[in-house]
Image (cartoon, rainbow, N blue to C red):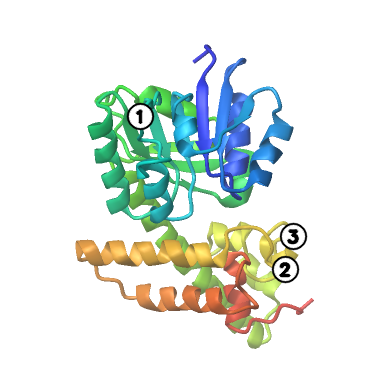
Amino acid sequence: MNDPLKLGFIGLGAMGLPMASNLISKAPPGSTLRVYDISENSMRTLVERHPVSVVICRSPKDVSQKAEIIFTMLPEGSHVRSVYLDPSTGILGPGMSARLLVDCSTIDTKTSLQVARETETHDSKARFYDAPVSGGTLGAEAASLTIMMGCADDGSDAQYALLDRLLRLMGKTVVACGGPGMGLTAKLCNNYCSGLISLATAEAMNMGMRSGMDPRVLSRIFASSTAQSTICDKWNPVPGICPDAPSSKGYAGGFKVQLMAKDFGLAVAAADEVGAKLVLGRAGLEAYEGASRDKRCRDRDSRVLFRYIGGREDWE
């Protein structure tokens, strides 16, 4: 992968912008990155960082006519359908030169598989992949994301090697999950589990603090016992435990609680579709949806559940 690449990136939000920046920063010299976002400011921010290699486009269709490899990072399935399938402005339109389409959004698998089928119907030489990510904005900025690819690594997919190399420009751990839609399946399972861990950690810390425990002591116990988790160690929901965590910055930044509510809801729906019994799912979803509606919590990092359940933030 030494020759210049004609790249595209659509969706320059809190995750997409740093991912796109890392992609073009590490791409072979002479590579170009055509970008589109509904926010003019986001596109101009990227141009300011990479004035020689980033080109602003006016629609997804415009990107697809000049880029050969396109990444998308969008909020919901409806946005993915519009970006790819809109007959006037979508990627899958007349003159599409793109051959490798990679969607890093966290959406429902049904939509992803639909876009994959439409891609193959539109152009038999083009391929669409689901490749959702985990690691939040900090991981996106540091290029330390875990990326879950909806493809196999057994040699049956001719694009696997190139896809793996490209994704490693934006992430640290890249895992082939088996086939179309399996990247999203892995992501939804992961977010379901991590969402419950965050909620359980917030509840347990609140219980201990209300009983008189120093949260620093309790978090150290968790870290060396069976309650240990990345959430506890790096993203603790109690302010002041992890200085760099969003909770210690008024829950600013991180992964917005309404986005976790969306992902958690997708996971619960996916479980229903396959007949997987969930004991904690409905309660977890209710907590995230409730926090999303709470004006004290909305637009804050998802660990703001500690605030939502009445945790004491001024304990120091």
- Mark 3 surroundings within 10 Å by alpha-carbon count, few (fewer than 14), some (14 through 19), many (20 or more): few
- The amino acid type of the residue labelled 1 equals Pro
Q: Which residue is mark 2?
A: 250
Outermost top residue: 3
**Which image quarter: residue 298?**
bottom right
Q: Which residue is mark 1?
A: 94
At label 2, the amino acid type is: Gly
Depth check, mark 2 against mark 3: the one in front is 2
Give the foreground label among 2 and 1. 1
Residue 227 visible, this angle: no
Residue 149 visible in the shown view:
yes
Whole-angstrom CA distance, mark 3 to mark 1, is: 51 Å
x and y, in percent, of residue 33 in the image = 57, 27
Mark 2 Cα shell of 10 Å, populated few (<14), some (14-19), many (≥20): some
State whether residue 93 is above or below residue 194: above
**Residue sitting at the far bottom:** 211
> Compared with residue 146, is residue 269 higher up or lower down, i.e. above or below?
below
Tell whether 191 sits left or right of 119: right
Q: CA distance from mark 2 to mark 3?
A: 11 Å
Is 199 drawn above or below residue 249 in the view shown?
below
The residue lying at 49 percent from left, 32 percent from top is 62
The disc placed on residue 211 is none
**Three-letter code, disc 3:** Pro
Q: Which residue is mark 3?
A: 243
From the top left corner, tell me how far across and down residue 245 is, in percent: 68, 59
Local secondary structure at mark 1: loop
Looking at the image, tell me whether mark 3 or mark 1 is earlier in sequence order. 1
Which residue is farthest left? 275
